[in-house]
Image: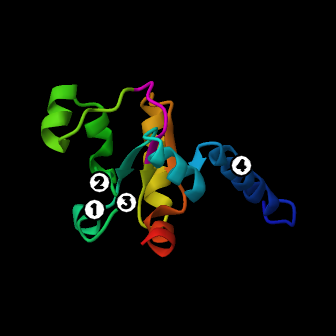
Amino acid sequence: MLQGAGWGHIPATVAVRTMAGASTVSVSLPELRSLLTSGRARLFDVRSREEAAAGTIPGAINIPVSELESALQMEPAAFKALYRTEKPKQEDENLVFFCQMGKRGFQATQLARRLGYTGARNYAGAYKEWLEKEG
């Protein structure tokens, strides 16, 4: 009953709106370079430990996406003990999440934002683009 030419357009419109809204929290490679050079970003590699061990963006903290929710809810001392760095604050700007291709980084960014990390951003080009252009 809901099959018609008009019905197929609704999901596409929704997807476009979602992606347009998401673009405001995305970081491009040139912007990421600038943020890193100026020390104004913290990078979080949300790939598995094995993926990150094989290569990552210099300075990135590896927190697999499967651990991210619990990590961002830890007490600061426990976070520092486990990840060997200061826990980000909810008001910190430019908390940049990335993965291999973009999907997990986007999920991590959305999760962090839901938990109140207003400066959470996604490097949509992900490690794949970094490796191609910077590696």
Name the foreground residue: 3 vs 125. 125
Report x, y in % for residue 103. Answer: 49, 60
Which quadrant holds residue 89?
top left
Name the foreground residue: 57 vs 79. 57
Residue under numbered circle 4:
20
State left or right for residue 74 relative to residue 127: left
Instruction: Tell me the mark number nearer the camera, choosing from 1 and 3.
Output: 3
Which quadrant holds residue 74?
top left
**Disc 3/disc 4 C-alpha distance (Å):** 26 Å
**Disc 1/disc 4 C-alpha distance (Å):** 28 Å
Residue under numbered circle 2:
64
* Stretch in magenta: 90-96
Q: Is residue 116 above or below residue 70?
A: above
Which comes sooner in the sequence, label 2 or label 4?
4
Most distant residue in the left direction: 81
Q: Is residue 50 above or below residue 36?
A: below
Which comes sooner in the sequence, label 3 or label 4?
4
**Disc 2/disc 4 C-alpha distance (Å):** 26 Å
Whether label 1 touches label 2, CB < 8 Å: yes
Q: Residue visible at 87% across and 60% down?
A: 6
Magenta residues, dominant SS class: loop
Residue under numbered circle 3:
57
